[in-house]
Amino acid sequence: MKLHEYQSKTIFAKYGIPIPKGRVAATADEAKQVAEELGGRVVIKSQVLVGGRGKAGGVKVAKDADEAAELAQQILALTIKGLPVRKVLVDEAAAIATEIYFAITNDRAAKKPVMIASAAGGVDIEEVAATTPEKIIKVHIDPLLGLRDYQGRDIAAGIDLPREHWRAFGLIASGLWQAYSDCDATLAEVNPLVITGENKLLAVDGKMLIDDNALYRQQALSEMRDLDVEAPSEIEARRYGLSFIKLDGNIGCMVNGAGLAMTTMDIIKLFGGSPANFLDIGGGASSEKVAAALRIILTDPNVKAVMYNIFGGITRGDEVARGILAALAEVKTEVPMVIRLVGTHAEEGRRLLADANMITAETLADAAQKAVAVATGG
Ligand code: GDP
Ligand code: MN
């Protein structure tokens, strides 16, 4: 899960990382009001969940409140990399002397978090990484020991940070590590961390990615999720604990198990079809969950056939059948349905579905071929 800049910076501030004063605004008027409160120059920053906002015209400095309103108006009308700007962050503008890149992320190969820094921070960091990788310093962190003070100093020395900033930098490094670890983040990034005109370190931009698998124990963070940027069907699916990803094809899939869902999608493709979604109803799904899954699949107007591939183990065939019947009683549909149901209580399930006007299949290949045929009008 991605956090917005303003959310990430609020978290950083709790961990003692200095951030500019500021607040989010959803309209030009609000932006003007915030700018008046802050006084002086402000920076207007689009809050969209992509990088490179600066280069896309989504970050602009205003000299006063009137200009803030004007720029906020412009930025709120932008769509950046396909994402409409719905909010802007209005921050006190910083006078920037130096831009540093500073982040912690997971190094999968090393199986450890890694702290990454570069004196060549700012909007061109990707190019720095590609053309002059030696300008990027990395220090691995032992997750059990945590970040050691000397490691913060190693990074500071590695990027030739003037000594007068080492102490402040050390505190920022340990704050960032603590935030990263407490939040179950997979990325905590400050780009740029600037040295200001007053010779102070300041986190001007912030970005955090939170591990979705940890959200169950990150209540406060999961409530920060921006629902505006997700497909409504995916939000609904999450509410029911379904793993659902919308795709572009026309065969809706309902499968129990992620691996089986992948296989199902592959087999559909093998027979010339195209899946409309990935959907794992999980093990032991209740009929209520199955009904929700079917409703979600059928909200997609592209869906021309639904294919069920249920391999009963913990999941019971009769429960799945009851869910399908409940959903069909509620959602009237002409969409043809193909079902392959095997394993625990499969016979009972098939018996329940005998009158449901579904196409039954013996094997996965059989089911996929039938689904492709009906989806293409065969
Ligand atoms: P990003 O492009 O999405 O990474 O957005 P950033 O927040 O990093 O802003 C992009 C660039 O705008 C930064 O690298 C700075 O050069 C500039 N910028 C951001 N905030 C300020 C500010 O307060 N004052 C000044 N002068 N420039 C800023
Ligand atoms: Mn940035």
Image (cartoon, rainbow, N blue to C red):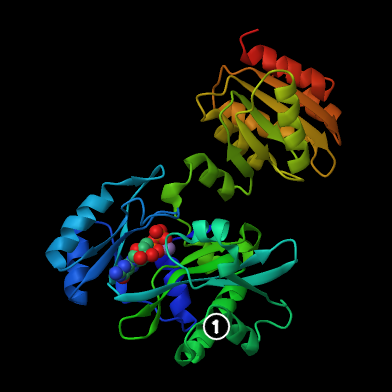
**Within the displayed image, which quadrant is ligand 1 positioned in?**
bottom left
Give the camera-side residue of 65 and 219.
65
* Crowding at mark 1 (Cα within 10 Å: few <14, some 14-19, many 20+): many
- For label 1, the residue is 156
| In the rendered image, the vertical position of residue 346 relative to residue 45, given as above or below | above
Q: What's the residue type where badge 1 is placed?
A: Ala
Res. 218 in view: no
| In the rendered image, the vertical position of residue 147 relative to residue 369, given as above or below | below
Give the camera-side residue of 181 and 228.
181
* Identity of the residue furthest to the top in this view: 378
Query: Where does the N terminus fall, quadrant-wise?
Result: bottom right
Left or right, 190 with respect to 105, comes to: left
Q: Residue at x 47, y 76 (%)?
A: 12
Res. 142 in view: yes
Q: Residue at x 51, y 57 (%)?
A: 126
| In the rendered image, the vertical position of residue 50 relative to residue 176, given as above or below | above
Quadrant of the image occupied by residue 10: bottom left
Q: Position of residue 263 (x, y in %)?
A: 77, 33
Quadrant of the image occupied by residue 329: top right
Q: Tell me the element at label 1.
A: helix
Q: Position of residue 162 (x, y in %)?
A: 47, 87
Query: Where does the C terminus fall, quadrant-wise?
Result: top right
Q: Position of residue 168 (x, y in %)?
A: 47, 88
Q: Residue at x 15, y 62 (%)?
A: 67
